[in-house]
Image (cartoon, rainbow, N blue to C red):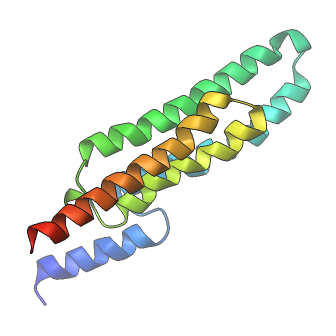
Amino acid sequence: MDLNSAQRITQAEAARTGLGTGPNRRLRLTLFIGMPMVFLAFGVLILVPKSLRDEVLHVYEAGIIGCLLHYAWVFAKYPRHVGRPPYLTRDLAMGGGFYLPSLMLGFWPGMIAAPAWTLFVGITYAVEVTRGRNDHH
């Protein structure tokens, strides 16, 4: 085994477990920080006066949009599955996790965008795999 192969195996293992590295780490941190923030938002909603509750909701909703845009930005940097680091396609599809906080807040754009994002990633992956199989025949 040469050094390049050993490094690739190490990178793949790091991407599979824990926070990974590079774009995998960024997407996982986006998910692990962004999703539970809904509970912080609920806590703040309890503490602030009624007149500020809409603003708190809008800030968290903007955060959800920002998180989903971050997923789109990483996808734009790695549009083809074959050119992505290991497990990045899986991590891209995890953007659908923002459905639950959107549902909890009644934020309909997030309830539509999060699952649509996961479908988009899955469909692009399926199309690419299908094209790859057809190219080999």
The answer to whether residue 132 is left or right of residue 94 is: left
User: In this rendering, is residue 75 above or below 25?
Assistant: above
Q: Position of residue 126 (x, y in %)?
A: 33, 61
Looking at this rendering, what residue extends furthest in the bottom direction?
Answer: 1
The answer to whether residue 84 is left or right of residue 105 is: left
Quarter of the figure with the C terminus = bottom left
Q: Nearer the viewer, residue 5 or 132?
A: 132
Residue at the (41%, 63%) spot, across then down: 20
Q: Position of residue 90 (x, y in %)?
A: 43, 61
Q: Nearer the viewer, residue 121 or 101?
A: 121
User: In this rendering, is residue 41 above or below 2?
Assistant: above
Q: Position of residue 58 (x, y in %)?
A: 68, 20
Residue at the (75%, 31%) spot, across then down: 106
Q: Quadrant of residue 102?
A: top right
Q: Is residue 121 visible?
A: yes
Residue at the (19%, 62%) spot, across then down: 131
The answer to whether residue 36 is left or right of residue 77 is: right
Q: Is residue 25 visible?
A: no
Q: Position of residue 130 (x, y in %)?
A: 24, 65
Residue at the (51%, 54%) spot, across then down: 94
The answer to whether residue 2 is left or right of residue 80 is: left
Q: How many marks?
A: 0
Quarter of the figure with the N terminus = bottom left
